[in-house]
Image (cartoon, coloured by chain):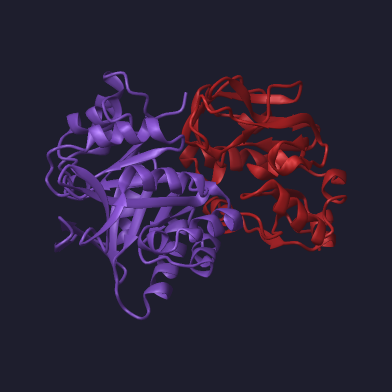
Chain colours: A purple, B red
Amino acid sequence: MLTKRIIPCLDVKNGRTVKGVNFVNLRDAGDPVELAKRYSEEGADELVFLDISATEERRKTLADLVLKVAEAIDIPFTVGGGISSVDDVSILLQNGADKVAINSAAVKDPNLITELSTAFGSQCIVIAIDSKQIEGDWKVHLVGGKVPTELDLFHWAKEVERRGAGEILFTSMDHDGTKNGFANKALSILSELVNIPIIASGGAGTISHFTNTFKEGKADAALAASVFHFLEIKISTLKQTLSEQGIPVRI
Amino acid sequence: MKEEIVIIDYGAGNVKSLEFAFNRLGKEVVVTNNPAIIKNAEKVIFPGVGHAGSAMQKLKEASLQTLIPNLKQPVLGICLGMQLLCSKTAEDDVKGLGVFDVEVKRFTPEVKVPQMGWNTVSNLKSPLFKKIEENSYMYLVHSYYAPICKQTIASSEYGGVYSTALQNENFYGVQFHPEKSGKVGAQLVQNFIDL
């Protein structure tokens, strides 16, 4: 039986791991390769690296990091952050990334999704969507959630699926950093609407939040950062608890 | 000189991760599309990700489509590599290399497509699964699958039971990614080395 995935997310800047609370105040939580190994040994099903560097050398730094991670771990990982072309994706996949996450570049040029899925296959193209509610409507946001667009979350999700995305990483900016639980209502609508896997992101604070996002949010995977980085939730305990509650997980 | 293990690099696979998987077990590998080196290798890995149509095209451009099905040493097809070893695939309506006598089909929309994540492997039947327990987890990501057939050596369940591994004499195929399947995957890689 296919299991639900637990995915620690490592925000990296200039080769180091950081995690923002609501994407603003950054705290250093260590070396990404060491963290990746630790998570892999603790039972993480997959890892996501989001690069938030803004330097000129960022592409090379990220490609180097991907190579080191691929060498060190034997579970799949996704890389995201500032990826905007077929060439960007090509180097990351060649260096051992399993999937890439595209966010703003896909909104600016939706045809990029088509190009990428044609070139590399849907299985490695994750579309990351940051969204929050504006007067009750879920709107897609850019630049780490700072810039609102007119794009409706659900229309956009449908379109990325149609263009060949293999998976959606949905982050609710209303929930991210709050530790009050995932956006399960929006997640369950998304999960019914599209026929590709959905990763829930934003709001993890307790083990029951994970249970709820799988049961109520119908998510295929759940992503979190600080609760794992600062050992507030141990992955092994989390998966054991999920299993006891009847949610299929890999133990 | 006879090279021990060769990974076929025809521009359609995550060969770096595979290479690292062997390196972690203390094995060096040769990554090449050179037909002579592939032919003389002790063992051959045939990877593949992406689309069946373009992968088969690249295989033909590298003049490997007749070499591969005639190899005599142990060959391991992984993911799309396994599917291309089948007789036919519904993806891009591609004729396969015909090593496995089964036609690859697309998952129906009752399940999410692609299947992405860790699934159990069962009914394990080959030395490839030595020391691997029934219902171990392997990492899979795919939209097409090989149905159960005479050459099935392991099965998984996703909207129905399908072949998650195949074997025909010296040819082995796995739908999952052993290089991404943690310790269990590493055991499978070791088993292939030990064949």
Question: Residue B84, image x and y in percent?
Answer: 74, 42
Residue at image position (70%, 48%) is B46
Q: Nearer the viewer, residue B66 or A34?
A: B66
Work out which quarter of the rendered image holds the C terminus of chain B and state it.
Answer: top right
Using the image as rendered, state which of residue A89 and residue A174 is in the foreground.
A174
A54 shown above or below B26 = below
Task: Judge by depth and name the residue closer to the eye, A158 or B97.
Answer: A158
Residue A111: x %, y % from top left: 50, 59
Residue lying farthest bottom? A56
In this picture, residue B37 sits left or right of residue B82: right
Residue found 26% across the figure and 26% down from its top: A216
Q: Position of residue A89 (x, y in %)?
A: 50, 63
Residue shown at 37% from the left, 33% from the top: A191
B85 up-or-down from A126: above or below: above
Residue A148: which quarter of the image?
A: bottom left
Q: Residue at x 13, y 42 (%)?
A: A179
- For residue A84, side relative to residue B94 (left or right): left
A100 displayed left or right of B82: left
Q: Is residue B195 visible?
A: no
Q: Position of residue A165 (x, y in %)?
A: 48, 48
- Total of numbered circles in the picture? 0
Picture quarter with the N terminus of chain B: bottom right
Residue A119 falls in image quadrant = bottom right
Residue B39 seen? yes
